[in-house]
Amino acid sequence: MQLANRRILLGITGSIAAYKGAELIRGLRAQGAEVQVVLTRGGAAFITPLTLQALSGRSVHANHLDAISESAMGHIDLARWSDLILIAPASANCIARLASGMADDLLTTICLVSQVPLAIAPAMNRLMWEHPATQENLARLRARGVQIFGPASGEQACGEIGPGRMLEPSELLDLTARFFAQGRLAGRSVLITGGPTREAIDPVRFISNRSSGRMAYALAAAAVKEGARVVLVSGPVDLEAPRGVERIFVESAAQMHDAIAARAPESDIFIAAAAVADYRPVAPALSKIKKDASNRQLELERTPDILAEVAAKHSARFIVGFAAETENLETNALHKLKEKRLDMVIANRVGLPDRGFDSADNEALVLWPEGGRRELPLARKESLAAELMAIIAERYDAKSQTENR
Ligand code: C5P
């Protein structure tokens, strides 16, 4: 599943190669990608929306400035939804309109508002391909960072032989997978816990903590940027799932434990960034507890230590824990590293107003076995996450090399 959780907006334009779009959708979905199709008027002359809808499992977007389709998912939402826009086939006309920044149909409008990478698979007659106008347009697109997949050379639908054939769906699939497989964690799977947990006292009350989940979400986004497939098991937080991340919402420590137990064995790297409640009410009341004049006692029991369990069972290859401490940061973090037998611990000072829990900034002291140590100064959680992910990738590689020796 090289494309698990990747969202691909597939543009199909007017070319006889449009029929290959059908096979491409099947291939992309078989690799785990979600696909939405934008069909141009020219494209619709070669393949029906019904075929594309059946294969992509979603309705096809064809109309520009159409009130009904805009209310379902408008061009801005479609642009935001995707991780990659792939236009296959891309006709000479479409390439020319992209090059000059036109927005006269849905597909070109989306390309203009989108900030995600664009890849095109040209398909046209060899004379159109070789025409200086087309070559100039392609050069402009290349200079803007557009990926050009193909074309192949060979027999053409019009009977001529030469360059301009669209690449086969299997080749486009490989190129798409390779496009995503960039970064230090390409092809690796990363499992992250984040946010607080809620431990029920009764149906309306719970014990929780101040964790905002921001560090975990920033780590998940950084792991995607490094090319990893990312699953984020999140407690209740008010954050959008980062693009490309599979998020599983849970409430209690027990639910988080079960979600992790199911996913850890297929993960290369496990990062426990959640602030899991350490205690929960022994017997949550089944109906709302009524107040009366007397004081109340709440009996608490320990929750499962998710991180310790993953480490003890070696369910993931590389295991990272967090240590949020109010005092003796380094000593306590080193203790956690050894006691839980982790591959790395990321220690934060908490209880300060401007960093740690529920704040936009954080600093970290990173420790790993045999005296590994790196201090990262106070920074936005997003840039700290990128630095942390680079260190995790480096240590993961180092551990894999020693194991393979
Ligand atoms: O021992 P302590 O709770 O301070 O350890 C913190 C680390 O352990 C964090 O990485 C946290 O996500 C993880 N943890 C866990 N399950 C628990 C408690 C903590 O995975 N029940």
Image (cartoon, grey):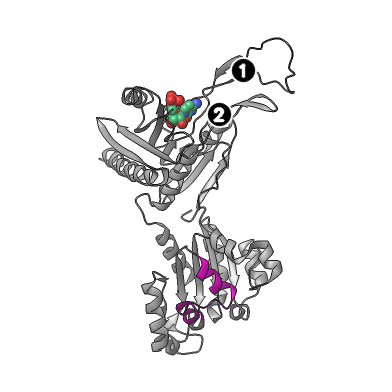
Specify the quadrant that holds the C terminus: top left
Secondary structure, mark 1, is loop
Q: Look at label 2 and name its amino acid.
A: Ala
**Residue 68, position in %: x, y?**
71, 67
Q: Main secondary structure of the magenta part?
A: helix
Q: Please give the range of residues in magenta.
A: 94-114
Q: Which mark identifies residue 329?
A: none
Instruction: Name the residue rendered at 52%, 53% in the picture.
Output: 5
Q: Is residue 280 magenta?
A: no
**Residue 190, position in %: x, y?**
44, 43
**Residue 125, position in %: x, y?**
47, 86
Is residue 306 visible in this depiction of the protein?
Answer: no
In the visual, does 235 lie left or right of 351?
right
> How far is disc 1 from disc 2 in space, using C-alphas?
13 Å
In the visual, does 45 lie left or right of 368?
right
Residue pointed to by mark 1: 282
**Residue nearest the observer in this picture, 261 or 381:** 381
